[in-house]
Amino acid sequence: SVTIFGGPFLSSLQPGNLFCKFGRISVPGLFVSSSQIQCNTPPHAAGSYPLEITQNGQDYTQSRYSFRFYHECTIHSIYPVTGPAIMGGTIVRILGEGFIESTSLYCRFGEAEVPATFVDSSEIHCSAPPTKEEGLSWLVLPDQRHNRTILEDQMLLPMSHHYPNYLGKLVNVEVTNNGQDYTWSGFKFLYQNDIQVMKLSRASGPSHGGTPVFISGSSFVNSTELTCKFGEETARAIFLTREAILCTSPPIPTHSFHTSQEMIVIIYVSNNAVDYSVGGHFKYSHSLPSGTYQPGAEEVDTLLRCPRGTYCSSYSLRNFTLCTPGTYQPLVGQSQCILCPIGYVCSEFGMAVPRICPAGYVCDDTGMYKGKPCPAGHWCDKGTATVSSSCLNHGILDASYSSLDTCFDNSTDDFGLQ
């Protein structure tokens, strides 16, 4: 319906005398007031055409006002298909064809109309208006569908589950180029109750990430779009219940720290990976104290000292590393292991104390994980650390005597820890 302002329009006109002409096609007009009439547009080819009127059925005006007919716009897809209800403001990307850049380009969510932002003839953006909480009801996610045609029924959230239910409201999404004639696409938008974050299980972790953070709150939705953000870094959220989710801190670039060893970021949570609610603060530490690790499994922030037989390097901050064969570590909280001393062997992973070189072998070097067979002409009792002197007063010996009683004893009482 086109409203035409001008006049003076006569109320005493005979029926059939008031007409509007779009191009060459005339349609009856409707008197509204002495300065206003209305006409319904006829079907017409796309393009701009003169619009004139007559009050006697013959003599048309020569005002040269133009009216533009355009191809009907259509919607092909929208994203995202969900958004917060109370806060609103979800920027919905609408793809289709036939969109026109004009001040009359609008979107409609249910009954609420909002201006659209023109991108090009195949894309516009619209901000979903807020809705009232009392308008929400408990919904089953798999039942929420687009209704484009009888044969083309699409789930809004294909990977969603029937349980639990969620508070929400399903509305139609349509577009108009002229502020009046809306599409009838059948696309839907699901308002969901806004996320509220109450508590974080932990508020700090190492810069390489991997710290699990349990987040308590309300209105979390079990969908593939459930997401956390640590500052600018995105992490997938694991749904536990409507009141709890689990997020693992992503690694953060080292250049983000500048000169500080710590950086505080904001944790955000989103049900649609677009609209985020603030969840709290999280502190990244660029380094941990030497000889400590942080497994990331406690409800409170805890640094643990590496146990005996292990070390904690700057590359394994989530766990300790066992000392390798040939090394040991008798102390806790160390950043490296010690080479096995002369006269001893460290034959296994994770040794806290070296073992004395067994009888019949010689351990004449550091870092040995097994002894060398005692050579012919020598006695090698346990703890033998050298074969530089031959055994005396026993004549000539061969290898069969290599495990006989001591030729010399250089063992110590403190396992070589001096």
Image (cartoon, rainbow, N blue to C red):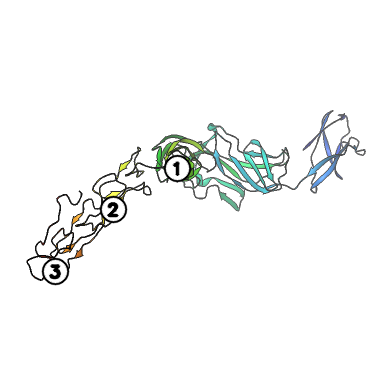
Q: Is residue 162 left or right of residue 125?
A: left
How far apart marks 2 and 3 lie (CA) works out to 35 Å
Q: Which residue carries the number 2 mark?
A: 323
Q: Which residue carries the number 3 mark?
A: 377
How far apart marks 2 and 1 lie (CA) works out to 49 Å
Q: Is residue 416 left or right of residue 1?
A: left
Q: Amino acid at mark 2?
A: Cys
Residue 222 shows in the view: no
Q: Badge 2: few (under 14), some or many (20 or more) residues near its Cα, within 10 Å?
A: many
Q: Amino acid at mark 3?
A: Gly
- The residue mark sitting in front, 2 or 3, is 3
- The residue mark sitting in front, 2 or 1, is 2
- Residues at circles 2 and 1 in contact by the CB criterion of under 8 Å: no
Secondary element at image label 1: loop
Residue 348, picture quadrant? bottom left
Q: Mark 3 or 1 closer to N-term?
A: 1
Q: Mark 2 or 3 closer to N-term?
A: 2
- Image spot of residue 204 (x, y percent): 40, 38
Q: Number of labelled discs? A: 3
- Residues at circles 2 and 3 in contact by the CB criterion of under 8 Å: no
Q: Badge 1: few (under 14), some or many (20 or more) residues near its Cα, within 10 Å?
A: some
Residue 390 shows in the view: yes
Q: Is residue 174 left or right of residue 4?
A: left
Which numbered disc covers residue 164? 1
